[in-house]
Amino acid sequence: MTTADTRADRPLAIAIAITTGEPAGVGPELTAAALADARGRWPSARFIVLGDRDLLAQRKLVERDAIDIDIDIDIDIEHHALAAPVEAGTLNAANGRYVLNLLDAAIDGAVDGRFDAIVTAPLQKSTINDAGVPFTGHTEYLAERTHTPRVVMMLAGSSDKPLRVALATTHLPLKDVSAALSIDGLVETLRIIDHDLRAHFGLAAPRILVTGLNPHAGENGYLGREEIDVITPALERARALGIDAPGPYPADTLFQPRYLKDADCVLAMFHDQGLPVLKYATFGEGINVTLGLPIIRTSVDHGTALDLAGTGRADPGSMIAAIDAAVFMAHHKRAV
């Protein structure tokens, strides 16, 4: 590890680790662009960037031993060597384990208390799988590595677009979603959302609107019984635990201002039920937060954008928002 100016006279600084993700993608340059935007933005945070030093130099993040950003913030580089040379936009399975090494180092540092939060740039699932490592996604991997039995994927807009959407199921084929839903599972998911919105976002009494699974929320059983047999009993049990979780609502009409104005989060039943709406409203400014973990993790709301890698045209808005959220959540956790 090579360290830039650590400014040790600020012992209370929040430590944020940033993994630079797929080396052929936009992660390295988004990290650079986001930190370049940091002038006066995060005065009480320091950043530890995890990645290959030469790669970061190529993407204009560092000049060999120091960040090439002339602003008053704390930034360290934690060097992890690439397994193979990288060409922007061209995937190489030889670097699949490099990407996981970055993630493992960030997770270990957060679990050990060295990092207050981690922010993850996008990775390429196919590259990791092609490297011989079964990999479904960041969310599932974080749960496995931290020995967390259940986590919740939540995407959110920026501070001026505060829509939040959490998922009851994540990266599953649509045909498997119904079987993956259970009363106990939904209750636990709602408990995690309620707890983390209180603990990390400072919401005293979160209100979580819950969608149905089927069109028209099942139409009283004529279009499916999941609402009757699973979702409604789960909501009744959650409300008995003090969780404000009305529903199930038809997903095609729920995402309207008159319903969302008093809501803190929407719980959707599957990935492409809730996320297209959120990404339409907030794309490029939204973030991904993993709830239920013993650590704080935020991420961008998009993929590796291989077509933009190395061009300097990738928009850092989502990375900036992810760092904003990580700093906010870490400060809130430290204060309570």
Image: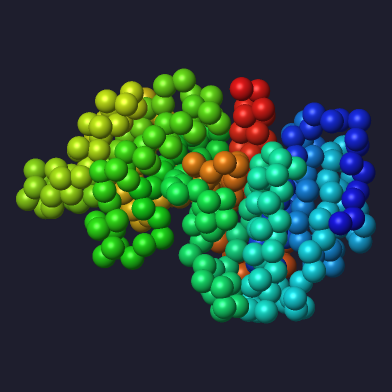
Residue 311 position in % (x across, y down): 71, 66
Q: Which residue shows up at 43% across the image and 48% down it?
A: 150
In this rendered view, identify the residue nearer to me: 39 or 107.
107
Q: Which residue shows up at 32% across the image and 45% down it?
A: 185
> Quick check: 310 left or right of 9?
left
Residue 28 position in % (x across, y down): 72, 60
- Tell me the quarter of the picture where residue 187 sits: top left
View extreme (top): residue: 204
Inspect this view and state whether residue 168 appears. yes
Residue 147 position in % (x across, y down): 53, 51
Relative vertical location of residue 239 with respect to residue 131 in this rendering, above or below: above
Residue 217 position in % (x across, y down): 18, 45
> Quick check: 20 left or right of 233?
right
- Colouring of the image: rainbow
Relative vertical location of residue 176 with respect to residue 219 in this rendering, above or below: below
Relative vertical location of residue 122 with respect to residue 127 in this rendering, above or below: above
Q: Which residue shows up at 75% across the image and 78% down it?
A: 84
